[in-house]
Structures are given as structure tokens and as C-alpha cells.
Image (cartoon, rainbow, N blue to C red):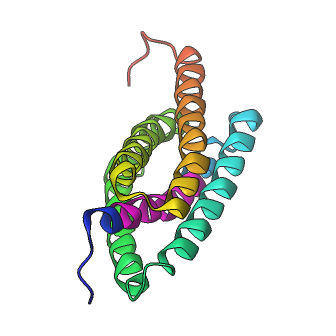
Amino acid sequence: MAELTNLEEKLAEVTGLAMAARVAGDKVTRLAKDQDSDLVATLQKMAEEASETEDRCTQLAASFDGKKTAILGEAGAVKKKASEMMKTYLDKDADALDGFEFLTMAEAAEVGHWSVLRTLNERAGHAELGKLVEWALPIQERHFQDVLQGSRKLAAEEDPNEPA
């Protein structure tokens, strides 16, 4: 497999996180489906945007001469790691609040990775990658705010004195 540059590896990471975001969104949607229809609608929109992000990243990976397979292979490894983290965090006893708290961590990680990719690309000057980052980063920042607000909304409905 082709050796990836730091820039290409970071592209693989954001691609893998987008892949994992769809899976996590589906899991948390199942946890929240009977609790809050507005939060479920937010999760569904996020899943659609994650799918579009994955598609755009995959298309861009194809433009890196001879590296698409390596980039997507690394993306798959990142997705697997993120899915394992989700399985650990969201066990059989998880509820909607647990799900939103997990997504808050995951979305913060995505914002961080996209920000790092933007910084790496400032030196690399890859025009199409720059366009992708400028499209995706605001979406990821909104996703983070949406799940943080969802976490807070669900927490406000909890009795703080009730046994966990």
C-alpha cells in the first residue's frame, strides 16, 4: 500500500470519522427515538451530512494520484476504532443522554481533526482540499453545538437526585 503524507493521513482520518458518524448517529437515534422528535430530526440531518461528507472525501481521495486505496484503507481503520469506542461507551444500559454525551465527544474530535487538516493544508495549498475543509468545518462545528445542546436538554430533564 502507498505511503501517506501527513495531509493524506488526516484526510483519511476525517473520512473515517464521517463514516463512523453515520453509524453513531443511527445508534443514538435508536436511543432517543421515543424521547424527543426534535433531537431525532437533528440526528437524521447530521447523518445525511455525514454521508455527504464521506462522499466528498472519497471523491477527493481519488484525486491523490495512486493513493485512493491507501487513504480509504486508513479511513476504514479509523472508522473501526471509532466504532469500538462507541461500543464501549454505549453499552446495553445506555440511554439517550449517554448517546448525546458520546456524540459530543465525537463531534469535538471531528472539529479538531478538520481544524488540523485546514492547518496542514495552509502549507500544502491543495485547492480542492481547501474547498472541502471550508465546506465541512462549519458543518462539524454546528454538529458539535447541536449535540451539546441536545445533551444539555436531556440533562435538564433528569432528576439530579435520582439514583443512577
Who's the residue at 39% across and 74% down the image?
76
The total of numbered circles placed on residues is 0
Based on the displayed image, in which of its 4 quarters is residue 128 positioned?
Answer: bottom right
Quadrant showing the N terminus: bottom left
Give x and y (percent) for residue 30.
62, 51
Q: Which residue: 51% across, 32% down? A: 97
* Quadrant assignment, res 75: bottom left
- Vertical placement of 89 versus 77: above or below? above
Tell me, yes or no, whether the highlighted magenta stretch contains residue 60.
Answer: no
Indicate yes or no whether the magenta region holds residue 20: yes
Identified at 44% across, 34% down, the residue is 101
Q: Is residue 105 left or right of residue 134?
A: left
Q: Residue at image x 52%, y 20%? A: 155
Q: Residue furthest left?
A: 3
11 or 97: nearer the eye? 11
Measured along the vertical axis of the image, is residue 12 above or below residue 164? below
Range of magenta residues: 10-26
Q: Tell me residue 2's x, y (percent).
A: 27, 86
Residue 64 horizontal/vertical position (percent): 43, 79
- Chief secondary structure of the magenta portion: helix
Quarter of the picture containing the C terminus is top left
